[in-house]
């Protein structure tokens, strides 16, 4: 069964450093999402992406964040200058579209900013 | 705008007992509703969803949920709990066909503990 994959599974970085989280959505899916879950809190929407552009973003998704689909398979989230409060589990999700509403989630990347 | 309230951050049941996890939603448009399960150190797995049609939906692992528009609820049930059901359960809502990018809005989650 097709699945969303994410790399790395864990990343430790120093405050102020740039990180890139990578996702491979399910092939032929058209909509892509990033969510995050701070430890002990609920899953929060960050951004949605369709047709090579951002379709919606949350207040959390400020200028430090960017997303890109550099090729036909990868979908990346970049945090330009990490802060302590960026420490969280980041989930990528994809959706087929065309009336199929289920978002399929990857296993997540646990980011720790020191 | 949508929001989700999950009553009870922790629920404990005995093995074989009924599981009931509560979810109430708020939505300005007809909602699509989802239940996801998260096992320790894993991602989110879809249990079941309601979009349109039959209001009682069945999912994986014996779970089911009923959409009640009048009560703005989408409670998750399972007749008989198994030890393997211990996990965190998230209710989520999206704005259906009016939702644009269809972002999911999640509740705060309910940790289910199953005891012998």
Image: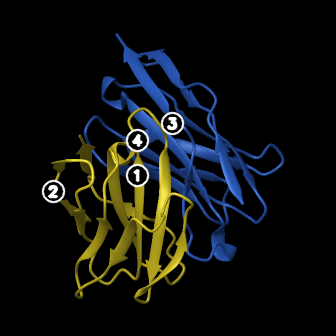
Q: Colour of chain B?
A: blue
Viewer-nearest of discs 2 and 3: 2
Residue A8's mark?
2
Viewer-nearest of discs 4 and 3: 4
- Which element is circle 2 on? loop
- Would you name the residue on which mark 3 appears? B109
Task: Please identify the quarter of the rendering in which residue B4 is found.
Answer: top right
Pointer 1 with pointer 4, Cβ within 8 A: yes
> Callout 1: residue from which chain?
A
> Callout 2: residue from which chain?
A
The yellow-coloured chain is labelled A
- Would you name the residue on which mark 4 appears? A38
User: Which badge, 1 or 2, comes first in the chain's sequence?
Assistant: 2
Label 3, label 1: how many angstroms apart (C-alpha)? 14 Å
Label 1, label 4: how many angstroms apart (C-alpha)? 7 Å
Quadrant occupied by the N terminus of chain B: bottom right
Label 4, label 2: how many angstroms apart (C-alpha)? 17 Å
Residue A36's mark?
1
Label 1, label 2: how many angstroms apart (C-alpha)? 15 Å
User: Foreground: B83 or B72?
Assistant: B72
Label 2, label 3: how many angstroms apart (C-alpha)? 25 Å
* Other-residue count near label 3 (Cα within 10 Å), few / some / many at <14 / 14–19 / ≥20: many
Residue at 42% in and 32% down: A40
User: Foreground: A11 or B52?
Assistant: A11
Image x and y of residue A38, in percent:
40, 41
Image x and y of residue A52, in percent:
40, 88
- Which element is circle 1 on? strand
* Other-residue count near label 4 (Cα within 10 Å), few / some / many at <14 / 14–19 / ≥20: some
> Callout 3: residue from which chain?
B
Pointer 4 with pointer 3, Cβ within 8 A: no
Residue at 48% in and 63% down: A61
């Amino acid at each position: 069964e097709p699945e969303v994959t994410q790399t790395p599974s864990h990343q430790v970085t120093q405050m102020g450093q740039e990180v890139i989280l990578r996702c491979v959505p399910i092939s032929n899916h058209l909509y892509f999402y990033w969510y995050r879950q701070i430890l002990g809190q609920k899953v929060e929407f960050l951004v949605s992406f369709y047709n090579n552009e951002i379709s919606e973003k949350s207040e959390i998704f400020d200028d430090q964040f960017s997303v890109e689909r550099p090729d036909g398979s990868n979908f990346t989230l970049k945090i330009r200058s990490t802060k302590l409060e960026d420490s969280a589990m980041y989930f990528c999700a994809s959706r087929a579209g065309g009336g199929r509403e289920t978002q399929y989630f990857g296993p997540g990347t646990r980011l720790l900013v020191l | 705008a949508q929001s989700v309230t999950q009553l009870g951050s922790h629920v404990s049941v005995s093995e074989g007992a009924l599981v009931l996890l509560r979810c109430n939603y708020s939505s300005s448009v007809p909602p699509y509703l989802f239940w996801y399960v998260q096992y320790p150190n894993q991602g989110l797995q879809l249990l079941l969803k309601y979009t349109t049609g039959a209001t009682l939906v069945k999912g994986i692992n014996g779970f089911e949920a009923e959409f009640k528009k009048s009560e703005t609820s989408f409670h998750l049930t399972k007749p008989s709990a198994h030890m393997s059901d211990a996990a965190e359960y998230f209710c989520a809502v999206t704005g259906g066909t009016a939702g644009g990018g269809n972002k999911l809005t999640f509740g705060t989650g309910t940790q289910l503990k199953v005891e012998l």
